[in-house]
Image (cartoon, rainbow, N blue to C red):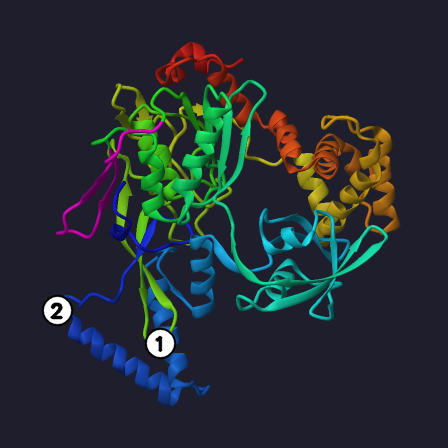
Amino acid sequence: MIAAGLFVGLLCVGGWWVGRDLAPAAPAPRRALGGARLFDQVLGAVATRYVDSLDATVIYDKAVAGLLRELHDPYTTFLGEGRLRRLNEQMSGTYTGVGLQMDIRDGWPTVIEPVPGGPSWRAGVVAGDRLTKVGGQLTKGWTRDEASQALRGPPGSTVAFEIDRGDQHLTMAVQREAVHVRAVTRVTLLPNMVGYVDVNVFNQSTALELQAAVDSLMKRGARGLIVDLRGNPGGLLEQGVGVAELFLDPGQSIVQLRARPGQAAQTISDSLPQRWPTLPLTVLIDKGSASASEIVAGALQDHDRALVVGAISYGKGSAQNVYPLVSGGALRLTTARWFTPAGRSISKPRPRDPFEEVDEPNGVTLPSDTLRPRFRTDAGRTVLGGGGIAPDVIVGDSLTPLPVQILARAMGKHLADYRDALAKEATKVKSAMKTPTDVVTPVMLEAVYRNLEARRIAPDRKIFDSASPWIARSLGYEMTRVAFGPDAEFLRRAQDDLVIQRASSILQNVKVPQQVFTPAATAPR
């Protein structure tokens, strides 16, 4: 695997590395001197004559913000100390706290799941616990961010909080420590013996976590593998390369970085034998899969190692260096663009004019498939360029069903109360559940509506009834989670997930990796 020292850094939505300092700038062309004088004149006029008096620091901050904004690059930004700290936490996968995943239920911070092995988990906190006080402060009305910040602090320090658990009231004192949030959040064997792993970020431990996860599935008899990169915003380039190396052969290229004109392109290639050469593989992507996710999907697709299933990815095809600044914070600067082994640009074209009309929800207009450039994989299959990774098998409707949209608008600011009503009903029927797939009855849906009525936030009955199939689905997931745990909830969700089901059916009928590309395997069932 490529040495860790080659790439040392992080980026919130893409593979990136940290520059230790700003490289010396190239000598400015003579014509730029006029620009420097122009800047000084404008700066002096604003400082001495603008109607409102501005501190010099404020003026320089605005000048920096304007310069970066006019580059029309959403990934080149100034990171204040707070943003840089949060980014480091995200990419390292580690923060100092008590290890709780929370949501707001009925106005109170409520535990969704303690981080396995974390300090709260060891102290006995369980899903469903309501935090009523943290550090002596009443938590009613807090946001998730407020609750999270209150539970964080220096390592070794102690935070006291009070919990309501049914009719029990508990007081705990938990010592804060480094908590690792796993990059691979779900590892399971589907009923047809197809392995499934959900990779939600490329942080410093992603490749090792994925290796351990797949090894465990192989020991359990997995005969195929689904790697789910949907919604994965990317992360460390080094880790994207490391994940691709697990499935490719030595010498196969993974990604090419092209910097500014005059600088040589850099190709990063595999250096180790693949770990599971006989394992059939599918990779799931969607419009939330970005950067390092696209590097992995593109490399495995170009080398015919994985069948890519889902929807066209985000199209974040640039690399950033992060340069610490003496004033605090850092400058994140785009320094290269990357391309797949076949030469496809990952960057999806984006309008510069904020008032330009676009026809896709994420503000991107792509050419039709007939206009997109075509490339060839190692085996001669046709793959599409033009931005983002186009899947081999397109599955899934990214549009929220109209009845659900109407319900969401009707609930407005009360969506959290709606979720709490579902949680209340799920808790109420928990003891009566016999299997993780128990059906949601009309009586249960009626109870949810009555709960909303009692809160005086119920939508029009016709709106609720029109959305009832989706409400029943959400209530079923919540019931299963409360009664049987998150693993059982996932398996219930997977039954309704068209993308997982399609990938699973493809893998179920193949014995060697190359069979996933045959018409018989990919034909709709």
Q: Name the residue under label 2.
A: 27
Q: In this view, does 172 lie to the left or right of 262?
A: right
Mark 1 secondary-structure assignment: loop
Q: Residue at x 62, y 67 (%)?
A: 158
Classify residue 139 by image quadrant: bottom right
Q: In this view, does 149 lie to the left or right of 90?
A: right
Classify residue 374 by image quadrant: top left
Q: Which of 250 and 291 is in front in this view?
A: 250
Q: Is residue 313 left or right of residue 423?
A: left
Q: Residue at x 88, y 49 (%)?
A: 454
Quadrant where the N terminus is found in the figure: top left
Q: Name the residue under label 1.
A: 327
Asked if the magenta segment contains residue 171, the reply would be no
User: What segment is highlighted magenta in the picture?
Assistant: 253-275
Q: Residues within 10 Å of mark 1 (few under 14, many from 20)?
A: few
The image's mark for residue 272 is: none
Measured from the top left, where is residue 461 in percent x and y?
83, 38
Quadrant where the C terminus is found in the figure: top right
Q: Residue at x 64, y 55 (%)?
A: 120
Residue type for callout 2 = Pro
